[in-house]
Image: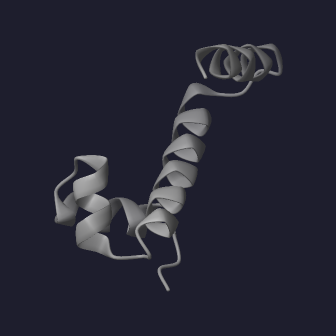
Amino acid sequence: MHRKLDQLINEMVEKGVNYRDALKEFEKKFIKKALEKNNYRINHTAEFLGLNRNTLAKKIKNNNISVK
């Protein structure tokens, strides 16, 4: 997994992807996958991610993530 992540980071740096944009996109996709894994249950997802429920709710809102 570390090798794949290193390759992805290298590609992003080579293509000039802005750090903030990369971080925001990673956060959005990571949260979406965690929500899917936990059947869109906020409490379970927050626990899975090691976040407070309110923090996760803010991140969902700030990233315009649709919750079924």
Picture coordinates of residue 24, whole percent (x, y): 53, 44
Image point (22%, 51%), residue name? 51
For residue 1, which quarter of the picture? Answer: top right
Looking at the image, the residue that sits furthest to the right is 15
Q: Would you say 25 lies left or right of 17 here? A: left
Numbered-mark total: 0
Image point (64%, 22%), residue name? 5
Picture coordinates of residue 11, whole percent (x, y): 79, 19
Could one spot residue 56 in this view of the protein? no
For residue 40, which quarter of the picture? Answer: bottom left
Image point (56%, 41%), residue name? 26
Depicted 50 relative to depicted 41: above or below: above
Residue nearer the viewer, 31 or 16: 31
Q: Would you say 23 lies left or right of 62 here? A: right
Picture coordinates of residue 9, whole percent (x, y): 67, 19
Depicted 43 relative to depicted 47: above or below: below
Image point (51%, 70%), residue name? 65
For residue 2, which quarter of the picture? Answer: top right
Colouring of the image: one colour
Picture coordinates of residue 53, whole percent (x, y): 19, 65
Could one spot residue 3 in this view of the protein? yes
